[in-house]
């Protein structure tokens, strides 16, 4: 191809995602593929980043992307491209196919699920988010935080709208929409005292920047002059933000993770894995909640899967491939290679946070954490670092802020020692929590807490 | 003949010229094409190979002191013009809101093409050969090693090629190409009925570098991986409890010490964290504006970051703000001597950028990143260091680690570790916990060996998250007067 022709190819008109998906499917079928799934995304993301009460960046990203799965003669390959013009798609599919042809047949091959498919409703979507006045919301959050006692506030506000299309060789054809607006505010009352506030929703009417900003500011103010704490075991109340991070039950319930040995739920199906009050579901779309999709990457309608009920591990998450291996049925959680949760919903408890603090009598309250890492993924031995506001509870009341601690424990031990689960839940998605999670606060007995030498 | 990526120079130039014509104080554009191939062999069986490409234009401008970034993969002059309009509105909005205006340091202009040589072209490496490569490694792990069975094996190998053209309104025009190969392995070990997750290399690290497939050939993984797996068995079988009630000396292996250079020196020394820009996500730093020259460690503490190491995972010659890369001495003789800077933070400090600004894809803003961070080697041998320890612990490798978001309070949990008595290694010890503050850590180093080693890692930072390829490295180091805990 001459240089001029290449320039022309780069500049040629791009397809809309629906056209792009159709073209990729047709091209792959013409090449003789028996199984083809094409998922096309058209996403618009806007972001305002702020720190020290100033806006540091406004960010806009618009992308059209395709994920393509091909199989022929049980040989399987997966690809993704950001090049949605006709020539780019054809070239990409042909390259994928050429690479697929030289692979050995897959021992784990399973055909794509056949239709007819029935999709109910749509993802959580609010068109108003596309034109939301993000900078105004940031100002509201910062002002509320400063009023509540913060000296400075940092964070980000992200608004995203995505159209998603699927076409499969097995008859799936659908379109979905989802949106989200996520505020992550961190307020500082001093360099040693910070608080974290989140507002995560798919609907602008539920978005509460002032409330989140004020909450971060209040926590920061309450965290002034934190105390150190002796190492030991404590009864600890974890906020929804922490619960959503340190209890990765849904991702551990992926049949892929279990088969790979990288889950604490290996060989635990139908067994008790926690207290009887522990419940957890995966939901395709939690109506009125955050995110979610009506179909998975194999075109199967997403739905509700009970992962944990009455403290018992009820069901793994499957795609077609893992379902075949485990002699089960897909749960609508494909990932072509590995099943993954769509929306994680913890069961609600029966106690308010204030009552939980009162009933805990003596212990700790941890509002946020980060940097969770495993010594042994299989056994669930891990540690994580509390950050932002944390408090000591004495005689049923919060008495002082604490800092410089680390939680070092094991997931199975903690799930067996949950004493309280709150009746209220919050939507969580932020830096440390990828999958939208509807989580309560939990009090766990006997949590091992350590601290650094030199502190 | 022009390279393929060069065909898009016109878009880059147009974006910069238009942004300037519209009144921007500063503008830059980066057209970037990334392609990658990854294969996963799971318990000896290939999963579907994954191929991907990403291509598009990212632009950044300063208008009235406000900063805006935008990106799209629908690349046309009309689209660029429309995005620039939006960016200027956004920058104005940001500027009207903020008391502190954004300025960039003045930097030298560069017009250059640079690339990493490939002796064995990655585009010639088929998915079939990647799988064969992984199968050869897997074959070395199928049988028990020292009575430990590796019952689950997740082995990843792949490559990526990143090409970009860059221009800014100062007159820089750059074109770069970086091919990169990578390997990662996660194993589940079974011994005496107990299961343990380990990685080889330990600490969830990887192996690889920039260059063609010859980089992977040189690693000789069919020897290195089973050797590494064999070394983990000493930790897996260990039953002795760590000596938790005494102050003792410690020798850290290169993998552990290398990660400390990244976590406890590189990250806190990122100027954007120090100035609070990453406050809500990656966090801030215990260092302050005036911490240059601060004594943080002993006279034996030396940490550098050098993106120009040939073949390294974090290699680059120009950053994504058009600044030439160079080695940075972060801690020199125990004193913080330099922060990692981009042009905005350099302006704040009244200095030049040291070329630390990187973006991982066309649609991500450049932010301050490490390249290859490491503790400088000394002139001791491991045996000499060991000989002088009367009572101590040798933590050769680790798995679990974390650190608080100011980078003051860190923890490493040993995988392969031993008691040291009178200059000799004794019993293997189970999961010693090394939990220490940063000043105490750097202040406790009294010797550095001459056996510098690197591993690869993916460094997480930014919002949206950007996982950047880096090396971490160190020789064996010795610390005096520390403590260990137990899990």
Image: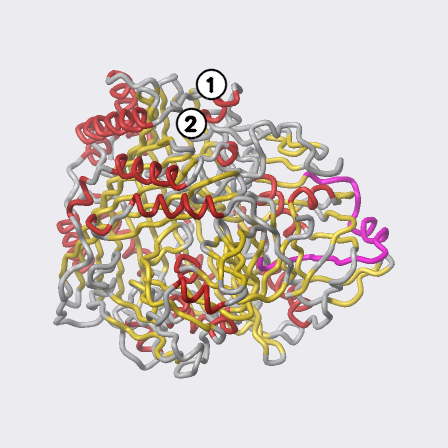
Which residue shows up at 29% across the image and 38% down it?
A140
Q: Chain of mark 2?
A: B
* Lower sequence index among marks 2 and 1: 1
Q: Which residues are magenta?
A: B376-400
Label 1 Cα neighbours within 10 Å, binned few <14 / some 14-19 / many ≥20: some
Q: Quadrant of residue A119?
A: bottom left
Q: Which residue is mark 1?
A: B107
Q: Considering the numbered disc 2 on the image, is that residue within a helix, a strand or a loop?
A: loop
Which residue shows up at 20% across the image and 45% down it?
A129
Tell me, yes or no, whether the two marked residues, 2 and 1, touch with CB atoms within 8 Å: yes
Is residue B64 depicted above or below B268 in this figure?
A: above
Q: Chain of mark 1?
A: B
Label 2 Cα neighbours within 10 Å, binned few <14 / some 14-19 / many ≥20: many
Is residue A260 depicted above or below B285 in this figure?
A: below
Q: Is residue B12 left or right of residue A277?
A: left
Residue A163, image x, y percentages: 18, 51
Residue B321's tag is 2
């Amino acid at each position: 191809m001459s240089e001029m022709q290449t320039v022309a190819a780069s500049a040629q008109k791009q397809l809309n995602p629906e056209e792009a998906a159709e073209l990729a499917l047709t091209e792959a079928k013409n090449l003789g593929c028996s199984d083809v799934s094409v998922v096309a995304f058209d996403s618009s993301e806007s972001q305002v980043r702020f720190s020290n009460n100033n806006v540091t960046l406004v960010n806009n990203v618009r992308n059209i992307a395709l994920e393509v799965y091909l199989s022929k003669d049980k040989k399987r390959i997966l690809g993704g491209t950001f090049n949605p013009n006709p020539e780019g798609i054809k070239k990409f599919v042909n390259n994928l196919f050429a690479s697929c042809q030289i692979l050995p047949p897959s021992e784990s091959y399973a055909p794509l699920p056949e239709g007819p498919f029935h999709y109910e409703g749509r993802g959580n979507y609010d068109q108003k988010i596309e034109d939301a006045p993000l900078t105004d919301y940031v100002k509201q959050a910062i002002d509320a935080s400063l009023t509540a006692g913060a000296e400075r506030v940092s964070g980000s506000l992200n608004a995203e709208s995505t159209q998603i299309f699927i076409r499969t060789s097995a008859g799936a054809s659908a379109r979905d929409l989802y949106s989200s607006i996520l505020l992550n505010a961190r307020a500082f009352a001093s360099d040693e005292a910070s608080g974290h506030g989140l507002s995560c929703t798919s609907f602008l009417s539920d978005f509460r920047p002032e409330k989140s900003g004020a909450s971060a500011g209040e926590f920061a103010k309450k965290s002034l002059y934190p105390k150190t704490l002796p190492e030991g075991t404590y009864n600890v109340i974890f906020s929804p933000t922490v619960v959503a991070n340190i209890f990765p039950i849904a991702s551990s319930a992926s049949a892929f993770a279990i088969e790979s040995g990288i889950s604490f739920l290996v060989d635990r199906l139908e067994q008790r894995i926690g207290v009887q009050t522990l419940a957890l579901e995966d939901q395709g779309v939690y109506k009125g909640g955050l995110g979610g999709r009506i179909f998975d990457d194999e075109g199967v309608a997403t739905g509700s899967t009970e992962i944990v009920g009455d403290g018992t591990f009820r069901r793994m998450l499957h795609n077609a491939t893992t379902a075949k291996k485990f002699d089960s049925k897909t749960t609508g959680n494909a990932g072509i290679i590995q099943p993954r949760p769509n929306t994680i919903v913890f069961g609600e408890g029966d106690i308010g946070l204030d009552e939980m603090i009162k009933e805990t009598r003596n212990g700790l309250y941890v509002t946020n954490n980060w940097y969770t890492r495993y010594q042994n993924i299989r056994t669930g031995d891990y540690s994580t670092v509390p950050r932002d506001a944390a408090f000591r509870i004495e005689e049923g009341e919060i008495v002082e802020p604490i800092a410089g601690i680390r939680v070092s424990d094991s997931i199975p031990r903690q799930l067996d020692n949950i004493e309280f689960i709150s009746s209220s839940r919050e939507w969580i998605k932020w830096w440390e929590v990828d999958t939208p999670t509807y989580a309560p606060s939990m009090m766990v007995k006997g949590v091992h807490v350590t601290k650094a030498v030199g502190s | 003949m022009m390279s393929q990526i060069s065909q898009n120079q016109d878009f880059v130039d147009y974006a910069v010229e238009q942004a300037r014509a519209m009144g921007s104080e500063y503008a830059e554009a980066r057209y970037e094409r990334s392609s990658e191939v990854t294969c996963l062999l799971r318990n000896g069986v290939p999963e579907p190979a994954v191929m991907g490409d990403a291509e598009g234009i990212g632009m950044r401008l300063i208008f009235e002191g406000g900063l805006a970034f935008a990106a799209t993969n629908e690349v046309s002059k009309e689209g660029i013009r429309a995005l620039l309009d939006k960016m200027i509105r956004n920058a104005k909005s940001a500027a009207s809101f903020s008391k502190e205006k954004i300025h960039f340091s003045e930097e030298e202009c560069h017009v250059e093409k640079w690339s990493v040589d490939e002796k064995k072209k990655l585009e010639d490496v088929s998915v079939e050969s990647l799988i064969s490569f992984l199968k050869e490694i897997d074959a070395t792990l199928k049988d028990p090693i020292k009575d430990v069975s590796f019952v689950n094996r997740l082995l990843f190998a792949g490559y990526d090629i990143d090409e970009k053209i860059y221009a800014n309104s100062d007159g820089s025009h750059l074109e770069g190409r970086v091919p990169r190969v990578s390997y990662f392995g996660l194993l589940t070990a079974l011994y005496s009925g107990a299961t343990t997750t380990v990685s080889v290399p330990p600490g969830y690290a990887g192996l690889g570098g920039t260059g063609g497939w010859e980089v992977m050939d040189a690693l000789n993984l069919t020897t290195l991986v089973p050797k590494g797996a064999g070394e983990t068995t000493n930790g897996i079988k260990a039953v002795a409890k760590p000596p938790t009630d005494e102050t003792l000396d410690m020798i850290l292996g290169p993998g552990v010490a290398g990660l400390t250079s990244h976590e406890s020196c590189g990250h806190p020394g990122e100027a954007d964290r120090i100035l609070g820009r990453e406050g809500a996500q990656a966090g801030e730093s215990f260092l302050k504006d005036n911490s240059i020259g601060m004594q943080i460690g002993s006279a034996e503490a030396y940490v550098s970051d050098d993106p120009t190491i040939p073949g390294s995972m974090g290699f680059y010659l120009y950053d994504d703000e058009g600044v030439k890369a160079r080695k940075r001495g972060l801690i020199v003789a125990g004193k913080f001597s330099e922060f990692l800077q981009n042009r905005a933070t350099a302006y704040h400090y009244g200095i030049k950028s040291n070329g630390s600004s990187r973006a991982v894809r066309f649609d991500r803003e450049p932010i301050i990143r490490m390249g290859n961070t490491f503790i400088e080697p000394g002139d001791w041998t491991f045996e000499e260091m060991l000989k002088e320890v009367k009572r101590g612990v040798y933590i050769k490798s680790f798995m679990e680690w974390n650190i608080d978001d100011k980078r003051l309070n860190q923890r490493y949990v040993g995988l392969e570790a031993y008691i040291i008595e009178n200059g000799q290694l004794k019993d293997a010890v189970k999961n010693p916990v090394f939990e220490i503050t940063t000043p105490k850590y750097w202040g406790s180093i009294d010797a550095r060996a001459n056996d510098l080693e690197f591993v690869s890692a993916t460094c997480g930072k930014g919002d949206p998250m950007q996982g950047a390829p880096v090396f971490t490295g160190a020789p064996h180091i010795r610390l005096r007067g520390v403590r260990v805990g137990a899990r």
